[in-house]
Image (spheres, rainbow, N blue to C red):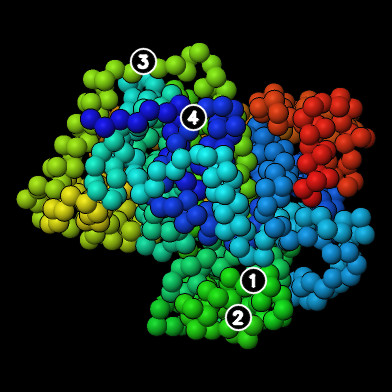
């Protein structure tokens, strides 16, 4: 039995996993990263438009702060988010973007004087302050009150990932590539690492760790039409689910991005619309103002996607041999803007469609993009039900996104959650309670169990093809668990997925090669992916309301009275054919921002009985307290939940620390320096 021992095991080599590992390593602990691919090929590189952080440097971002970012995030989540976690996130985001600047991310910068921009289809001149010259700038994104999305042209994720990977190399953090965790080792109370399969030679290795973190990204490949890379199969969430102890949160909360190119499904960044791009129908009519007069193309993604699909259903879609679509028009941005700030989009259009967006319209349609659900964690990133199991990034339901995330908050979460979870994992490892005495018998039992499963697949005389099963699953999810959901389609989805799960027990793998074996990989992955699909479809069927990206045609109202809660899914035995669902209520009485209208989308809803009383308390506190920091503290304390080194206030041009941070804490002074050096 081959074993590898380490203090911390990070499963996933994207931005979240890398940043988590860096924090652990800097605290003096050993850490190993497992990755399906070389880290610089992780899906984090696909993030295009930018990272949200309330720096307030640009003219259109002036006056921005954590309070406004928090309000936008909660409205975006349709009040499904954990508000304390959202506070932790928005407070740390400026620190994260400045840290990345110090490490080498070449953020676009403010240029003083008059600059031309496109707003609402019209060319305008924006005058930037002299004192902001050279500081990190921001672009507009959907669902936000201020321009706060920091960006590197349209290759933000690429720059962030390469910088983070280089930093991990500098920290001498080992990355074991082409390795896939296929099961977690645990005793029902604590996680001790993972059983890992080499994608090169097929061998199994037990990685024994005091703490394990799942940072494997989302589960977009449950769908046929998705912007996600082929490695985004959700296996990290699946192995947590298969422990029978760890829970997954909000698996039915799945986001569809408004602008995937047709037919490839490749993402066209929200930055195109943030920079002034317009959505047009077959008549070249700009239709979004008809639905959203205020936010137009820049309402939240769930709202824009629904309006686009509804508009197509009205007969306004463009007919093509690849199906109906709508147009994204960025021609008015001009060649210079497209060639410098949207150059990746131009290359995608040229390589995959043979068009030039400088002169041509881009065919787009909503496509699956992001998974709000994942491994349920507390604010520290640790599973509440399985000790020593952590999760960060899209793989986690840390739950700052609720039922819909804002554009720019995802890649921001990878860096921020990596910072926070890395610190908490380091604290955990520094505690004497982290020491383990796992028995060899327990490790051997998991190794033998997983090897037996693989042998059964390799030697089966069944008749089912794993690739055909995966295709059928993806078609079922795309057709029935999409943007518009109803009881009939969701029941069809659950029934078809149950049938596919039964068929998956009869898979035959024809290739017996001991080395790289894609057929065997597809065989064990599809069995796990079907469980995730059932969590999503069954959870969507049970949730009889509409909230964020979960839209039920037969229950079109958000129902705070009955459904202001988080879905928790578990798979407690191999005999189960459906997940066990439980619900975690959100307490309105403790919310800093009680439920209300989002500012876009439907105003109709069913209110929670505690909402009115809590809103009166919030309004009363706002009248009595003029200092925003003290007001926030009185409504919903959260600073104590952050690692100590991340508790300092953020400096802005309009909020210098000399005036705001009276305590002069060490973390405050550190942030002051990082502002002046990295901004």
Q: Are marks 2 and 4 in contact (CB under 8 Å)?
A: no
Q: Which residue is mark 3?
A: 437
Crowding near the residue tagged with mark 1, few <14, some 14–19, many ≥20 C-alpha atoms within 10 Å: many
Image depth: mark 3 or mark 4 in front? 4
Which label's residue is closer to the chain start, 3 or 2? Answer: 2
Direction top: furthest residue: 432
Determine whether 339 is above or below 491 in the image. below
Res 501 visible: yes
Q: Which residue is mark 2?
A: 357
Residue 475, image x and y in percent?
32, 61
Image depth: mark 2 or mark 1 in front? 1
Number of the label disc, if any, that sits on residue 441? none
Q: Which residue is mark 1?
A: 342
Determine whether 397 is above or below 45 in the image. above
Q: Are marks 2 and 1 in contact (CB under 8 Å)?
A: yes
Which label's residue is closer to the chain start, 4 or 1? Answer: 4
Say which residue appears at 92% left-offset and 55% top-offset: 131
Crowding near the residue tagged with mark 3, few <14, some 14–19, many ≥20 C-alpha atoms within 10 Å: few
């Amino acid at each position: 039995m081959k074993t590898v021992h380490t203090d911390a095991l990070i499963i996933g080599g994207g931005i979240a996993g890398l940043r988590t590992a860096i924090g652990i390593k800097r605290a003096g602990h050993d850490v190993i990263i497992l990755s399906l691919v070389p880290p610089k090929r992780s899906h984090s590189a696909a993030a295009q438009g930018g990272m949200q952080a309330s720096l307030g440097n640009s003219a259109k971002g002036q006056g921005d702060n954590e309070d406004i970012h928090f309000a936008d995030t909660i409205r975006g989540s349709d009040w499904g988010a954990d508000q304390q976690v959202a506070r932790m996130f928005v407070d740390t985001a400026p620190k994260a973007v400045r840290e990345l600047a110090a490490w080498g991310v070449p953020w676009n910068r403010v240029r003083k004087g008059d600059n031309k921009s496109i707003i609402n289809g019209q060319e305008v001149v924006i005058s930037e302050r002299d004192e902001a010259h050279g500081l990190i700038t921001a672009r507009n994104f959907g669902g936000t009150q201020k321009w706060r999305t920091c960006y590197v042209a349209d290759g933000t994720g690429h720059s962030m990932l390469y910088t983070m990977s280089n930093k991990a190399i500098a920290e001498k953090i080992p990355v074991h590539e082409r390795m896939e965790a296929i099961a977690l080792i645990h005793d029902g109370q604590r996680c001790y690492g993972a059983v890992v399969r080499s994608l090169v030679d097929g061998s199994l290795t037990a990685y024994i760790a005091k703490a394990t973190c799942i940072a494997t990204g989302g589960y977009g490949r449950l769908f046929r039409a998705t912007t996600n890379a082929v490695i985004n199969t959700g296996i990290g969430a699946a192995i947590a689910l298969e422990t029978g102890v760890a829970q997954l949160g909000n698996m039915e909360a799945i986001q569809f991005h408004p602008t995937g190119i047709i037919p490839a499904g490749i993402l066209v960044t929200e930055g195109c619309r943030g920079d002034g791009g317009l959505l047009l129908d077959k008549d070249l009519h700009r239709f979004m103002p008809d639905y959203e007069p205020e936010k137009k193309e820049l309402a939240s993604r769930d709202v824009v996607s629904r309006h686009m699909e509804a508009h197509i259903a009205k007969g306004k879609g463009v007919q093509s041999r690849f199906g109906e679509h709508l147009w994204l028009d960025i021609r008015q941005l001009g060649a210079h803007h497209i060639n410098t700030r949207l150059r990746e989009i131009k290359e995608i259009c040229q390589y995959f469609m043979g068009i030039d967006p400088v002169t041509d319209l881009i065919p787009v349609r909503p496509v699956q993009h992001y998974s709000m659900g994942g491994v349920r964690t507390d604010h520290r990133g640790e599973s509440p039900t399985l000790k020593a199991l952590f999760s960060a990034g899209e793989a986690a339901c840390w739950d700052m996104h609720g039922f819909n995330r804002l554009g720019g908050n995802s890649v921001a979460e990878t860096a921020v959650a990596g910072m926070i979870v890395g610190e908490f994992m380091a604290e955990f490892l520094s505690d004497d309670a982290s020491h383990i005495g796992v028995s060899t018998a327990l490790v051997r039992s998991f190794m033998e169990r997983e090897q037996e499963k693989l042998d059964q697949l390799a030697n089966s005389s069944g008749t089912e093809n794993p690739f055909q099963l995966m295709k059928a699953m993806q078609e079922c999810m795309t057709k029935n668990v999409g943007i518009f959901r109803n009881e009939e389609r969701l029941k069809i989805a659950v029934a078809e997925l149950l049938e596919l799960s039964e068929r998956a027990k009869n898979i035959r793998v024809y290739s017996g090669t001991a080395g790289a074996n894609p057929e065997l990989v597809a065989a064990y992955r599809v069995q796990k992916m079907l469980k995730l699909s059932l969590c999503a479809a069954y959870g969507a069927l049970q949730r009889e309301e509409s909230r964020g990206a979960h839209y039920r045609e037969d229950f079109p109202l958000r129902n705070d009275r009955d459904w202001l809660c988080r879905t928790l899914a578990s798979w407690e035995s191999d005999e189960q054919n459906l997940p066990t669902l439980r619900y975690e209520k959100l307490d309105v009485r403790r919310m800093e921002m009680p439920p209300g209208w989002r500012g876009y989308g439907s105003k109709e809803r069913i209110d929670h009985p505690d909402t009115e009383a809590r809103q009166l308390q919030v309004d009363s506190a706002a009248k009595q307290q003029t200092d925003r920091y003290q007001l926030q503290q009185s409504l919903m304390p959260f600073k104590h939940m952050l690692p100590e080194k991340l508790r300092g206030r953020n400096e802005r041009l309009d909020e210098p620390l000399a005036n705001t941070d009276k305590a002069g804490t060490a973390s405050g002074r550190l942030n002051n320096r990082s502002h002046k050096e990295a901004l």
